[in-house]
């Protein structure tokens, strides 16, 4: 499936979608996996506890945020593909981070969890037909398609890897 039309997602998702180099969702998932795996595995346990400023998330909290967001985007995609009629809620990323317990977890466990979540996300998206991918629903009071959520999930990871490189490493 090609990249989604900007009319099929909230405008602020474009900042993530534009970071995905591939025009095909399946290829984008497949190509990102080795990049993110190598990136995360090159961060030490000690470094994963680092925050670049007072009140900012640690690298562990940032990865937990990515895990939580991937799950939420996958759930939204499932709902949209299955023609859910209810509007789905938004989420407060700072409240989630504050209640994540990420800093008490081992870095390797967080990496393993994210890779497992990503695997199930890929399987979910591979099960969708073209019609399901193009079906839209409402989340956080904004219309969006399942396809847009898939590209947003991939771009969200690229966005946070760039943030880590710029501010943390």
Image (tube, rainbow, N blue to C red):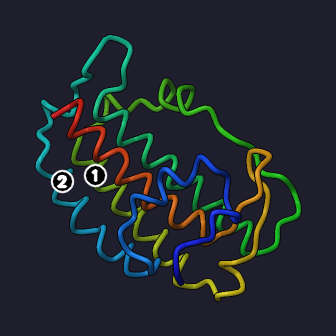
Instruction: Indicate left or right for 137 with 7 as reference.
Output: right
Q: Where residue 121 sits: x, y (%)? A: 49, 68
- Tell me: residue 141, above or below residue 95: below
Seen in the picture, residue 51 relative to 6 is either above or below; the reply is above
Residue under label 2: 39
Picture quadrant where residue 71 is located: bottom right
Residue pushed farthest top? 54
Instruction: Give the residue at x 40% y 41%.
Output: 64
Which residue occupies 21% across, 34% down?
48
Q: Observer-nearest residue: 151 or 30?
A: 151
Q: Quadrant of residue 19?
A: bottom left
Residue at point 44% right, 40% down? Answer: 65
**What secondary structure is marked by label 1?**
helix
Q: Secondary structure at mark 2?
A: helix
Closer to us: 102 or 15: 15
Image quarter hosting the C terminus: top left
The mark tally for this picture is 2
| Residue 36, label in figure | none
- Tell me where residue 74 appears, x and y as whole percent: 58, 62
Q: Name the spot of residue 117 as percent of width and height, x first.
A: 43, 61
Q: Is residue 88 left or right of residue 2?
A: right
Question: Which residue in the structure is indicated by mark 1?
Answer: 111
């Amino acid at each position: 499936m090609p990249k989604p039309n900007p009319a099929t997602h909230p405008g602020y998702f474009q900042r993530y979608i534009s970071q995905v180099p591939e025009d095909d969702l399946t290829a984008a998932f497949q190509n990102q996996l080795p990049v993110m795996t190598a990136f995360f595995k090159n961060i030490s346990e000690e470094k994963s506890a680092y925050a670049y400023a007072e009140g900012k998330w640690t690298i562990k909290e940032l990865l937990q945020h990515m895990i939580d967001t991937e799950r939420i985007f996958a759930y939204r995609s499932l709902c949209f593909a299955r023609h859910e009629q209810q509007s789905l809620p938004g989420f407060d990323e700072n409240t989630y981070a504050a209640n994540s317990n990420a800093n008490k977890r081992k870095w390797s466990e967080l990496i393993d969890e994210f890779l497992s979540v990503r695997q199930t996300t890929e399987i979910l998206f591979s099960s969708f037909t073209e019609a399901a991918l193009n079906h839209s629903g409402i989340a956080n009071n904004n219309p969006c398609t399942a396809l847009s959520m898939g590209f947003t999930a991939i771009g969200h990871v690229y966005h946070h890897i760039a943030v880590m490189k710029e501010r943390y490493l």
